[in-house]
Amino acid sequence: MSLTPEVVTQIAQLARLRLSATEVETFTRQLNDVLVYVAKLNELDTTDVPPMTHVLDLTNAFRSDAVGAGLSPDEALANAPQQQRQAFVVPKII
Amino acid sequence: MTSSWQHLTMHEVQSLLQKREISAVELTHGFLERIAALDGMLHCYLTVDAQGALAQAQEADKRLATGQATPLTGMPLAIKDVIATKGLRTTCASKYLENFIPPYDATVMQKLRQAGAVILGKVNMDEFAMGSSTENSAFGVTRNPWHLECIPGGSSGGSAAAVAADLCLAALGSDTGGSIRQPASHCGVVGLKPTYGRVSRFGLVAYASSLDQIGPLSKDVTDCALLLQAIAGHDPQDSTSAPLPVPNYSQALEKDVKGMQIGVPREYFQAGLDPEVEQAVQAALNHYEGLGAQLVEVSLPHTEYAVAVYYLIATAEASSNLARYDGVKYGWRDPNARELMEMYTASRSQGLGTEVRRRIMLGTYALSAGYHDAYYRKASQVRTLIRRDFDQVFQTCQVVATPVAPTAAFRLGEKTADPLTMYLSDIFTISANLAGIPGISLPCGLTSQGLPIGLQLLARPFDELTLLTAAYAFERTTAFHRLKPPVE
């Protein structure tokens, strides 16, 4: 279950992160330390234990489909790194 | 500038404001001057909003003059920089959001503004609330007012240090694995993590959505109750906020602990616990006995697995939540990126700090094909066991008492090289987040080096009343909350 530098590089790609060679080395070591530590969970038999993804007994919260207050286009665009004619500008995609 | 108002609590200032012995504007000026004099040394604040605060103080004075004040009207507060404040920079202590100005207020901010509070500014934290020392801030460390070479705790380190050093009357923080209680403990103030769902998370920048809660940091339990009262309640904007009525928390302060059963979990008093911390917590337990409470030895057998569960679940949720930082709509974008994937990857890699990237990596791995069952699912199952431990224990006691952290504040830089060691410092606070129960930290002593020690109390879901009753019973018969750090 040991992480290799290759797997770390692959995970970084999935997470859309770029790591320097030194970072790959450090992260490999540090993430392995953590994985060795969390392996202690395997001491426990959890065969019939349901997973808990949430602590509250909530079901879907519905509301009526009514128009409420929202952001104006100018407000929504105010933090954009680049914008033009009420749109976010990004590098060419196709 | 050395007027003594800043040393008072909110409920003490309240009567001065209502009798018009001081004005909210004078009070706010006093805090702004104190911040100018001391914050260069402590670095609690990332943004001070002097102009906004004085305008809010003027409004507060009008309300006070016309008898329309609430208990928070005119109270100068500090807000952790992970909570969205309309028109006021909100950075999450990240380079990625260095210039982000939210177009809306978090629900807790709307509530504080309606109550007439004065917002002095935004305070420091570990980047995206990931850390236990505030050393992961992209904008520099915050120092512990009790000892400038020590960490203030984290991730709400700026909130705790600002309250301790009287750079605000009280503050808001957020707690995902102990991030309110642990810094409160290290800075000698009161910090409360409400039950998951008690306080709206709308406008709280997400780290781990099934664990995050906003809560108060204050100088005493009465102020804690006042602030919780103001921010608690169901919010249609947060589908995970609980549709339950909010009790009157000041009632909690009128009850005592005679006959209350306080559980003492043996798993929290084992190897690794600093002897001075153990002694102070034991003395606090004895004190409760003296007040008529009954100590019950209990067991929370899955305590030792909590850190492992947390660092899989929290990082898994973080890897998903932080996918939004893609350089498109707000925040940092690498101006040199020429194509889309390059823009995502470069913007994220340049804007996000080392610990944040480490946790995204861990979470991505824990959720990745082939590993999901071994890590994420396994951790979610053990989370069930941890919750069951608490359900069991709360059948025989109303409150559980433990230390907040295994040691007092450690030195700056001491644990930054080894993430796992840093993670293990959260061992006593994480379980409450996994189980979704409320917890409070209150001062219960000082080490021989003069560093604060905290007592943690935990209670049943949505029973903040009992938590506050137990905390106040201790506070009003001891003087630890009156101790002040040596900063002037």
Image (tube, coloured by chain):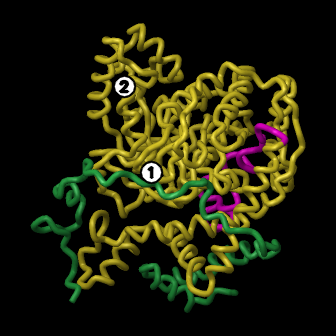
The colour applied to the residues of chain B in this rendering is: yellow
Q: Quadrant of residue B258?
A: top right
Horizontal side of B180 relative to B302 (left or right) equals left
User: Residue B319, how many percent across, how many down?
Assistant: 50, 71
Which residue is at the front of the view, B241 or B296?
B241
The colour applied to the residues of chain A in this rendering is: green
Cα separation, mark 1 vs mark 2, equals: 32 Å
Identified by mark 2, the residue type is: Thr
Closer to the chain start, of discs 1 and 2, is 2
User: Residue B435, how many percent across, how many down?
Assistant: 68, 54
Q: Which residue is mark 2?
A: B28
Q: Is residue B87 visible?
A: yes
Which residues fall within the magenta stretch?
Answer: B396-425
| Chain letter of the residue beneath label 1 in the structure image | B
User: Residue B170, how many percent across, how many down?
Assistant: 50, 32
| Secondary structure type for disc 2 | helix
Horizontal side of B119 relative to B219 (left or right) equals left
User: Residue B389, how many percent across, how many down?
Assistant: 79, 54
| Chain letter of the residue beneath label 2 in the structure image | B
Q: Main secondary structure of the magenta part?
A: loop
Identified by mark 1, the residue type is: Asp
